Amino acid sequence: MTTASIGLPVPDPDLAERLGVRLAYVEERLRDSVTHADELANTTSRHLVDAGGKRLRPLLALLTAELGESARPEVIDAAVVVELTHLATLYHDDVMDSAPLRRGAPAAHEVWGNSVAILTGDLLFARASVTVAGLGPEAVRWQAETFERLCLGQLHETVGPRPDEDPVQHYLQVLSDKTASLIATSARFGARYAGCRPEIVEIVANFGEKVGVAFQLADDVIDLTSDGALTGKTPGTDLREGVPTMPVLLLRSHVAASDEPSAGDLALLELLDSDLTSDEALAGAVAALRDHPVVAETRAQAVAWAQDAVAELVPLPDGPVKDALVAFAESLVDRTA
């Protein structure tokens, strides 16, 4: 068995080696899971698997499994389930966000059209369901509850907050459902199917929920501050499509709360609300927002959520696994891609 590259720091070298070997096996299983006899389905399903990715969710499942009997075969199944589910959501998200790139490659809908991309996402959900069924009724229920939250997060993001609802709090709930729910399930699955006690399973699930929010807030910053060649995405896609992110929501909130908003803030909002169809207009908006204090404010929120996630780990025994989970949380907000 080869060793996969782990994109996040694991302080203990023996643990890093063990995780790398198992992550390589998960990678093989992923490729087997998206292989179809139907040539079109095979090509479209492999599109994002072949593009690679951080594999954060299966890595977290493998890591929390180290708190129990990590060599159980069910742990690999659990890791495959969460990544298949994640990949399925990416096909759907890119259609809804009109994202031209994903992981440095053309998004599936750019290659085959929206309908094929959506149906491919559905196929991957089906493959995840087949695998999770082998883990038993409890896993099926957790997967269904996670899928419901994923859909609710996308629904609420699409519709937006109610008139009487705080847009920032609404957005945090969207992040909890759309992103953090699957990261929490990844942590839960790893511990549960490694035979950990229920209280350990809940601790790591709570950790995953909070670190998932931190991860997405950090993504909001990265979308404005990093080179698209590093992220594999077009910077500012959410701005172009009018999808709210925390920096924009904070800017709007500050302007709304001020009796005399600054001319610079008003001009920036006007720019963000203008036609950003052209690449030049989008790049200008990204550059202007990148220099505003709301970006640093968003990063501070990401750090705070990561710190809260780490605090959830206090009851766990000290050792390499706990250290790796702390490093996992910290690296998610320190990354540049």
Image: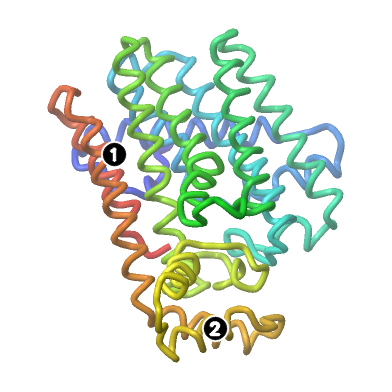
User: Which label belongs to residue 130?
Assistant: none
SS state under label 1 = helix
Q: Nearer the viewer, residue 173 or 30?
A: 173
Q: Mark 2 or mark 1: which comes first in sequence? A: 2
Residue type at numbered disc 2: Ala
Q: Quadrant of residue 197?
A: top left
Q: Is residue 260 in view?
A: yes
**Mark 2 crowd level (few <14, some 14–19, many ≥20, 10 Å Cα):** many
Residue that sits furthest to the left in the current view? 318
Task: Identify whether 28 is placed above or below 172.
Answer: above
Q: Position of residue 157 (x, y in %)?
A: 62, 51
The answer to whether one can see residue 230 in this image is no
* Number of other residues with Cα within 10 Å of mark 1, as a class: few under 14, some 14 to 19, many 20 or more: many
How far is disc 2 from disc 1 in space, using C-alphas?
33 Å
Q: Most extreme residue toward the front, as rendered?
A: 259
Task: Give the amino acid at mark 1.
Answer: Ala
Q: Image height check: is 191 above or below 195?
A: below
Dot 1 corresponds to which residue?
Answer: 309
Label of residue 285 in the image: 2
Residue at the location (55% across, 65% down)?
Answer: 232
Whole-percent x, y for residue 21 in the image: 39, 33
Quadrant the N terminus occupies:
top left
Considering depth in this image, is 228 or 161 the residue closer to the camera?
161
Identity of the residue drawn at 53% across and 39% down: 177
Picture residue at 59% right of the left edge, 16% below the top: 141
Front in this rendered view, residue 305 or 36:
305
Q: Is residue 73 above or below residue 257?
A: above
Classify mark 2: helix, strand or loop: helix
**Residue 136 rendering spot, x and y as whole percentages:** 58, 8
In the rendered image, residue 100, in percent from the top left (x then y), is placed at: 69, 67
Q: Quadrant of the C terminus?
A: bottom left
